[in-house]
Structure formats: structure tokens, C-alpha cells
Amino acid sequence: MSGLLWPGDHRAGDIFTDGAFLDAMIRVEAAWSVALAAAGVAPAGAELDVDALRSLLTDADLESVAVEAESGGNPVIPLVRLLRSRLGAGPAATWLHRGLTSQDVVDSALMWCAAEAVAAISTALDSQVTILARHTIEHRHSPMVARTLTQQAVPTTFGLKSALWLRGVLDARERLDLLRFPVQLGGAGGTSAAVVELAGADADIAALVARSSTVAARELGLEPATPWHSVRTAITRIGDAALECTDAWGHVANDVMVLARTEIGELSEGAGGGSSTMPHKSNPVLSVLIRRAAIAGPPMASTLHLAAADAVDERTPGGWHVEWDTLRTLLRRAVVAGDQTTSLLDDLRVHTERMAENLAAAGAAVTSEQSTMAEIAGHPAASEYFGAADQFIDAQLERARAITQKDEQ
């Protein structure tokens, strides 16, 4: 995909590109053919190999399928027509797509591509957990000014700030672990009636449906499921989880941008970005681009919920269609932002001397609360005013260790 207007898009590679989605649809068709044969519905020779199906298409076919998708409203119709024509006579062509509907292929392909994107995001989060734990430990006792509503408040440590970034990342990581990626295999109206009819009157319907779902899911690396046609929680939950990630990353980016201001100077990006006209500039470009993704995410997640709320009948006109590119864009941008956040944190420059200078310059203002509390308690003010910062840091480091140990097992 071109990233001219979304700098950094190359970081997502082939994840959820048009080519990747076309390939995912081919995977679904092949997996279903294997499932039909395993269930005893399709005859010998009807099974389709993914590589064999891929070999039937050329690079030019992606464009033609995209153009022809307009006539039927989705890309499955021209894809199936094209594959059947190139398979020629025989059971493979005859049984291709039998028992499926366009929604089955699109939704299952969405799940396949979404799972790949989420795996990449999870990898980024795991790296960030490691890096943030390192920053937190290193700067546990690095004093700085805490700021509330843009103003200096009380003393804190950069270790605690880093621990709070870590908390957001850990929360997002836990949310991803709850995601499920179910296959969609319901046929035209979500009843699997075509499969039952193909199997014949003597078929064990429950065993047939369970077997076909299990086999197809196994082939795709997804979860077996009964049809979920107009219940779109599988989509909205993925979108919400991606949004929780960009929220956490946006928090990091915003803090870095504020603390990297020339007049504050407590943090800086490892490299920074230049200016087309001002040689002295070293802009926090990664932070800017991460913030961009955090700002762009909520409207897309909202669109997914609007589509889910607009569900009607067994296939929603318009609401179903708007999900595809919305989910793709949201996840792809999350993959990019995740990788950018990892780079930002790994190369982050922490200027502890400047933090200490700013804290000292704040003078008695940042210890005014402490003075009040000490007076009420009737004892002299302590030499430090960091409260339970160490304990709060330890709580997040313990969560980080649990994640790290789980991943190592």
C-alpha cells in the first residue's frame, strides 16, 4: 500500500493490504473445501490446495476483482467466478464455494487478517513492556516535577511516569489476550441449509455442522463458531482493543512532546526530525505520528459500533460493507503506531539533570501541599515528598514480570 499521506505506513508491510485480503479469501475457500470433504459432503477431488488456488491468479487479477466487486457489492462474487473459470471442468470447480455465502468468505477473511495484525501489535506491546520496565527501574529515583492541568504540581519521579506508561501498555496487552477470531460459516441466511441439503436427509446435522466448522477453523488458524451474521461483536471487540492500544501510545507520545519542548527539555527523541526551512529544529516526529494514530482511531471504532448498532436482518445493507475498510485501516494504522512507539521508547533520551533543575527552580511552590500536610500532622516536613511512588512502581513491574514470564513459557 502507498503511504504517501500516512508516513510510516511501510512499517505494516503486507498486513491487511488488498493483496493480503485476496489471499485470505482464497484461504477461506480452500479451507472450506477441505471441511466439506472431511464432513463427507464433497466427493474425492473436490479439496482445494491454497497454493494451487493462488497459482490460478495473476497480479492483474487483483485489479479486475476490485473493479468487478462493485457490481455485486463485494469481492467474493468476481473471485469465485474467476476461480471456477480457471479450475475448468471437474469436482474442484463444481464444489468451490458450495454451502458458503459472500459474507462467510469476507467475514472469515477479515478475521484471518485481523488475527495477523493483532499478532504484530502484541509483539510490539511485548517489546514495549520490556523497554518500559527498563526505564522504570533505571529512573525509579530520578526526581522531576509532576504537572496537572499543564501546571507544576508536586514532586514525582520519572520512574513513576514510566510505570504509568507501562500500566497503559499492560492494560492494552491484556485486552488483546481476550480477543477471539471466529470463522463465519453460515451460508446464505445463517442456517447452513445448503450444506445440510448437500449432505442428504440421513445426515447427522449437528455432527456435520460441528465437523465442518472445526476443520475449516483449524485450516485457517481461527476458532470454530456457530454463525454470527448480524451480531458484530467479533468486529467491535477487535476495534475496541486496537483503540485501547492507540490510547496508551497516544499518552506516551503526548507526554514526550510536552517534555521535549525546548523550554522544558526533560525528554527528547533519539533522532528527531528536521525542518524543510529551519536548520535548528529537531522535531519529535515519532511522537507526532503516534499522536496522529491515537486521534484518528476513535472515529473508526465509532463507525464499527454504528455499523453493529445498525444491524438488521441476516445481512446488514451498508453497515456490513462499511466495516471492511474501516477495520482494515484501524488495524493497519495500529500496527504502524505500535512499531513507532517501540522505536520511540527504545531510543528515548531522558535528561535527568534537566528534570532536577526544573524541580529545583519550582522552589517552594511544589512543596506547598507537603507543608500543609506536615503542619496539620504536627511534625516537620520530610526531606522528600514522593509518597508511595516506589510501591506504585513495584505494582506495575510485577505485572510486567508476569507478562514476560508467560510469554517465555
Image (cartoon, rainbow, N blue to C red):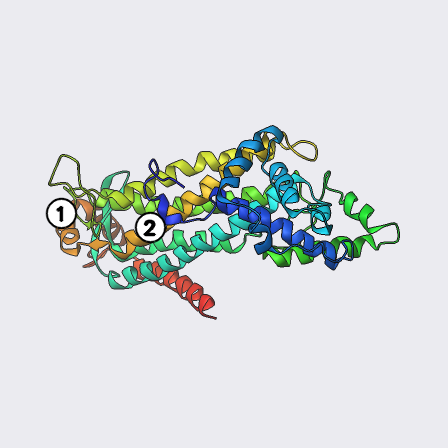
Q: In the displayed structure, does residue 91 sit left or right of residue 246?
A: right
Q: Could you tell me if residue 129 is visible in this image? A: yes
Which amino acid, by three-letter code, is at mark 1?
Gly
Q: Position of residue 200 (x, y in %)?
A: 85, 50
Q: Residue furthest front?
A: 89
Mark 2–mark 1 distance (CA, rounded to whole Å): 34 Å
Q: Could you tell me if residue 240 is visible in this image? A: no
Label 1's element? helix
The residue located at (51%, 33%) in the rendering is 303
Q: In the displayed structure, does residue 388 sit left or right of residue 329?
A: left
Q: How crowded is mark 2: few (under 14 residues within 10 Å), some or many (20 or more)?
A: many
**Disc number for residue 88:** none
The N terminus sits in image quarter: top left
Q: In the displayed structure, does residue 191 sit left or right of residue 152?
A: right
Which amino acid, by three-letter code, is at mark 2?
Thr
Which residue, given by chain and number where applicable, does mark 2 sit on? 341
Q: Is residue 310 above or below residue 19?
A: above
Front disc: 2 or 1? 2
Q: Where is residue 57 in the image (x, y as percent from the top left)?
A: 55, 46
Label 2's element? helix
Which residue, given by chain and number where applicable, does mark 1 sit on? 363
The residue located at (62%, 56%) in the rendering is 49
Q: Nearer the viewer, residue 176 or 321?
A: 321
Q: Is residue 189 above or below residue 146?
A: above
Q: Where is residue 65 in the image (x, y as percent from the top left)?
A: 55, 37
The residue located at (23%, 61%) in the rendering is 141
Q: Which of marks 2 and 1 is nearer the N terminus?
A: 2
